[in-house]
Every structure is written in C-alpha cells, then in structure tokens.
Amino acid sequence: MLRNSSILRNAIGLTIAALIAQPLAGCSGATPALPAGNATGPSATSQLSSAIAPRVRPDDVDPYFVTWTGNCTVYEVYEGVPPNGVWRFEYIPYGCDPAEGTNSGGTYEKLTKSWLVGQSTSAIAIYNPKWKEVGTLTEGLTGAQVGIATDLKGDIFASNFPSNTLTEYARGGTSPIASYTDTNLSSLSYVTVDKNDNVYVSGQSEGSGGLEVDELSTGSSQFSRIKTITGITGAGIVIAHTGKTLWVCDEGNGSKGTISAYTIPGFKRSVQFAYSGSDTGIAVAAAGNQVYAVDNVAYGSEYSVSLVIYDAKTGKVINASPGITTARPAMGISQKP
C-alpha cells in the first residue's frame, strides 16, 4: 500500500523507553479468581502437548491465543466452557524462558501464513507455520515494534515506539516501501488495519498529551485525528472481524482505564467498560462477542502476565489464565486463525 509524498525514508534512531513496573492489572482488570484445578499465580509453566493443539478450534468455545512474553511466543488454550475449563500453555521455541528477552508485538499474516514478531529492539522476526524463523526485518525500524499489523495485500505496518513513525513493508520484502510520520502524535504505539486498508494508530497527542487515535486513509500520506475518540494514555487497538467496530484501549491514569468500541464509520462510541492497568494489546473474537486482553501485574521486580476474556457487551470478566512470570510486560496478542 505505497502512499504518496511526505514519506520519511530515514527516521532518527530511537531506543525504547524504559518500561516501569506498576502494581496494577493490564488492559484487563484485576486478576479474577481462577477455575478450580488450574495452575495459579506466576509460577504456572504447564506445557500444551502437540497432540492437543490441532484439535483446538479458534472460536469462542475453545479460544486459542498467541501472546509474546520475554523471548517466547506463548500459545494459550482454554479447553472447555467458562468457568469450568482448563488453561494450557505451549512455549515456542521449546525450552525458552518467558522471563528473559524483549519480544514485543506480533500478528499473523494470512497470505504467507507467517507469524510476525517484534524481537528485541528494531527487528521483526518472521516465522513459518511450524515456527521456524525464515526471515528478519530490520531496515527502517527504530525503537520497539509494539504494534504490528497487515493489510489485505499482506503489506506490513510496524510502529517504532516511542517515536511517532510507522514503517511499511511490501509482502515478502525486506526493505521499507514507505515510512510515515504522524505529526499529531508525540509517540505512536499500536496499529490496526480495516477491510478497506485504512490504517489506524493509537498514541499520545502532540498537543494535549492524552490518548489519540489517528487514521491514515488509503492513498494518503497524512494522518487525520478521530475527534470522537479521547482518553488519557494510548494502548491497544483492533478492528473487529466484521470491519464495523474499532476497539480502543485507554491505559488511563495508571489506576483505572477503559476499553471502548466505536462504530465504523462515524466513530460513535457504542460500548465502554473500565479496567485497572497498564499498556497492553487487545484482540476481539470472530463473533464479536468477546474481547481478549493481556494483563500485566507487577510481581516483585518482574510481572505476572495473564490473558483475560471479557464479555464485549457488558465488560464482565468471563475468565483469566494463570500468570506467567516475565521480566517485561507482554505487549502483543493475536487469536490463532
């Protein structure tokens, strides 16, 4: 999706801002009680056998999630119907340590059936369906790739947190085809793309300093602010599978934030519910009835990272996975296609 003029080819190198531990939940509320029989707390390290994985359907009965924690990709599977099911985990690569490393955001690219993972600073690793690393993107990247998304052609968009730039690659390419600067923002965190290949980014307003969501329309090089969306701190955003809803996470003031749904077009808020926590990624079920969020709770000098399932209409917590101990908060989440 090569866009015209005002393209920034050589962004100034930036390093990721230090992530400060907070004794609060992520974009997902205080960690609720877990179902009986599950492993509990940050010490949970159960492994999902390969024999189980193919039977798990990516739907609302047995959701199958992928998050990125430390230097691990983590498959998180909920088997059964809440609240009587069981959570299981599989770490990729086997034997990795979720408490080490700097993996950030990630997503799945359908056309090439590849996983794209923000790996350390200024790099995106490309994995095939068997989780073999088959490539790396580094050219044109700065900071940390907290937000990664793809359009219908398979073009890749990656944020360069904490700058206000966005880098674009063509499917299969290793050199950027464009780089965009959102002059409305002081920093750009997450990115998502709708069914018309319009790109949306969340971050901090250059003017007010609060949460702002901007749109980069197809064929344009200029971001426009969505004036109906306001808040305190920019965090995860995602387009629902129907293409008619934009979900926005507001980190809030560090003790309370919100997750909101906005109509497309018009961006009128239709749903909003509160949570307590810090910056993180969100995803939405194919049926649109559940929202999934990464939960990062300070645990000593580290974090307890879990995944929380919300009812999309009421904001009620349906279930939460056991915690995984990690040195850094998990930022990205995707539902396995």
Image (cartoon, rainbow, N blue to C red):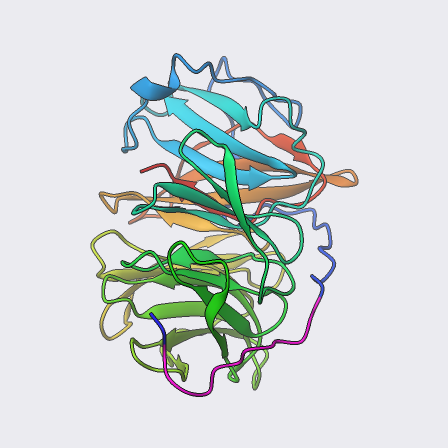
Q: Is residue 37 above or below residue 236?
A: above
Q: Main secondary structure of the magenta part?
A: loop
User: In which image quadrant can residue 323 be found?
Assistant: top right
Kindly identify the residue that appears in the image at 57 percent across and 83 percent down: 206
Q: Is residue 254 magenta?
A: no
Q: Is residue 223 above or below residue 265?
A: below
In this picture, residue 308 sits left or right of residue 83: right
Q: Nearer the viewer, residue 268 or 196?
A: 196
Q: Nearer the viewer, residue 184 or 92?
A: 92
Q: Is residue 12 magenta?
A: yes
User: In which image quadrant can residue 140 be found?
Assistant: bottom right
Which stretch did the figure color magenta? 3-14
User: In which image quadrant can residue 207 be found?
Assistant: bottom right
Residue 18 at least partly seen: yes
Kindly identify the residue that appears in the image at 51 percent across and 48 percent down: 332
Find residue 171 and report its horizontal and vertical position in percent: 37, 56
Find residue 12 and report its horizontal and vertical position in percent: 67, 76
Locate the C terminus by quadrant: top left
How many numbered discs sit on the rendered protein?
Answer: 0
Kindly identify the residue that appears in the image at 50 percent across and 80 percent down: 182
Find residue 7 and report its horizontal and vertical position in percent: 48, 82
Residue 30 at least partly seen: no
Locate the N terminus by quadrant: bottom left
Kindly identify the residue that appears in the image at 62 percent across and 30 percent down: 324
Find residue 272 and report its horizontal and vertical position in percent: 37, 59
